[in-house]
Image (tube, rainbow, N blue to C red):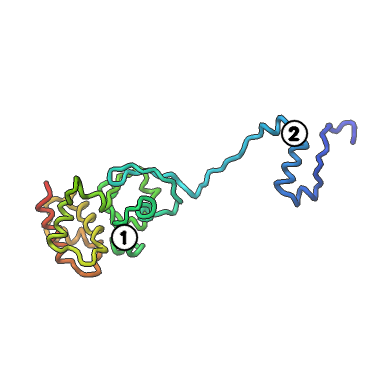
């Protein structure tokens, strides 16, 4: 060592060991160069998982707060995390409407909406329509007018109809047909569905 070189303690780690040992060698090198007290004060690095996000929303009037993977759809969140299985997974491509729920007063397909996109919203599923052990007028009308066959699409049909009737309480039959065109019934019960929605529009308060 030359006289003008700084007096740095020699690390007990060879270059070969450093390159081969990775993190273990780095730790040993730190021990050699730092006083014992300084080593104890080193900050611990923590990295949040950027692939997950905390979402908060009110579903059927109940607040929920869950951490979910960023790719989680609203349908997956509702069915998987909240165990509300009324919304159905029918196509996953915005085509059938069986997954329809209401978000901030608008009916949407929950199969392609991300849960993180809906964070902070008010969400209504079919499980939230009945109040005080009384069916919603739409639910009652679908029973009385046989607006269902197999029942798979029924929750989506009812929620799409509710979002529409909340905005247009006195519709014509053509209005209802157009509003419900995004919800497919594979059993082709469209005549009964139309009758059910029209009957509910007369029963719901304006």
Residue occupying image coordinates x 20% and y 49%: 130
Which residue is pictured at 70% across the width and 31% down the height?
Answer: 38
For residue 21, side relative to residue 204 (left or right): right
**Viewer-proximal residue, 44 or 134?**
134
Answer with mark 1 or mark 2, whichever residue precedes in sequence.
Answer: 2
Residue that protrudes farthest toward the top in the picture: 37
The secondary structure type at the circle numbered 1 is loop
- Residue at (30%, 47%) from the top-left corner? 123
Above/below status of 127 relative to 89: above
In the picture of the structure, the residue carrying the numbered disc 1 is 88
Residue 147 in the image: x percent, y percent? 17, 63
Mark 1 touches mark 2? (CB < 8 Å): no
Farthest residue, direction front: 133
Q: Position of residue 121 (x, y in %)?
A: 32, 44
The residue wearing badge 2 is: 34
Tell me residue 3's x, y (percent).
90, 31
Q: Is residue 130 left or right of residue 1?
A: left
Q: Residues within 10 Å of mark 1 (few under 14, many from 20)?
A: many
* Disc ID at residue 11: none
Q: Regarding mark 2 in the picture, which secondary structure is present there? A: loop
């Amino acid at each position: 060592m030359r006289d003008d070189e700084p007096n740095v303690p020699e690390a007990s780690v060879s270059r070969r060991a450093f390159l081969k040992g990775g993190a273990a060698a780095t730790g040993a090198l730190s021990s050699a160069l730092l006083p014992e007290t300084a080593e104890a004060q080193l900050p611990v690095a923590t990295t949040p998982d950027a692939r997950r996000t905390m979402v908060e929303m009110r579903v059927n009037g109940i607040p929920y707060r869950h951490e979910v993977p960023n790719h989680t759809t609203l349908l997956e969140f509702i069915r998987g995390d909240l165990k509300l299985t009324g919304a159905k997974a029918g196509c996953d491509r915005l085509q059938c409407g069986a997954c329809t729920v209401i978000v901030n007063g608008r009916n949407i397909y929950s199969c392609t909406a991300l849960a993180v996109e809906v964070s902070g919203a008010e969400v209504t599923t079919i499980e939230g329509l009945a109040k005080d052990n009384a069916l919603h007028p739409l639910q009652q009308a679908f029973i009385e007018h046989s607006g269902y066959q197999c029942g798979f699409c029924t929750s989506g049909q009812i929620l799409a109809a509710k979002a529409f009737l909340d905005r247009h309480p006195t519709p014509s039959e053509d209005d209802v047909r157009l509003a419900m065109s995004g919800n497919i019934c594979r059993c082709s019960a469209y005549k009964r569905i139309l009758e059910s929605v029209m009957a509910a529009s007369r029963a719901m308060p304006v």
